[in-house]
Image: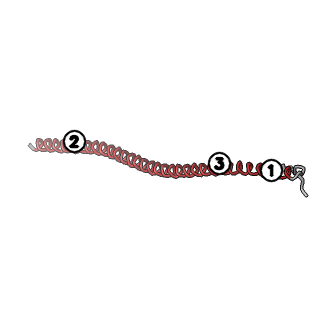
Amino acid sequence: MNDDKIKYAEKIVAVCIIGCLAIFCLFCVYNYLSTDKSADNHNDTVTIQRIEDEHRQLGDELADIRTELQYGQEAVGRAEERVGDLQESNAVSTEKLRESRELIERSRNIFKDVDRANGLPEAQTSSEGTTK
């Protein structure tokens, strides 16, 4: 009966060793699978965070571009107003120049009429006149 107890004890020890090995193998597989998922989740989290940061940065850059575009449009508007003012000023200057030319021509005609009325030879009234 002693042999039977030893064989029974050996079987129990063998079952315990096999059970411990099976539990150890299951723990290793579980640990491997959970670590792999954790790394993937971490990589996904980092990638998502990076995308969010880039999106935020692009949004800020877009807002800056919009602001610069508004400043540019305002500058173009001011330049267009200034061009309009200069065109009006040019039109006024052109009109005054035309009126001045008419006045000069009338003055020349008056001098000619005065010279004729006094019986004098006509004075040279062109811009190429003589200087004394």
On screen, residue 89 versus residue 49, left or right, reads right
The quadrant holding residue 36 is: top left
Give 19 or 2, whichever is nearer the viewer.
19
Give the image location of residue 25, x and y in percent: 26, 42
State which quarter of the image contains the N terminus: top left
Mark 2 → mark 3, Cα distance in angstroms? 108 Å
Colour option used: secondary structure
Crowdedness near tag 1: few (<14), some (14–19) or many (≥20) residues, C-alpha within 10 Å: some
Give SS at disc 2: helix
Q: The disc labelled 3 sits on which kind of residue? A: Ala
The furthest residue to the left: 1
Mark 3 → mark 1, Cα distance in angstroms? 26 Å
Q: The disc labelled 2 sits on which kind of residue? A: Ile
Q: The disc labelled 1 sits on which kind of residue? A: Arg
For the point 45% across and 48% down, the residue is: 58
Q: Which residue is mark 1?
A: 108
Residue 18, numbered circle:
2
Give 72 or 63, whichever is nearer the viewer.
72
State which quarter of the image contains the C terminus: bottom right
Crowdedness near tag 3: few (<14), some (14–19) or many (≥20) residues, C-alpha within 10 Å: few
Q: Earlier in the sequence, mark 2 or mark 3?
A: 2
Mark 1 → mark 2, Cα distance in angstroms? 132 Å
Question: Which one is in front in this view, the residue at disc 1 or the one at disc 2?
Answer: 1
For the point 22% across and 45% down, the residue is: 20
Give the image location of residue 106, x and y in percent: 76, 49
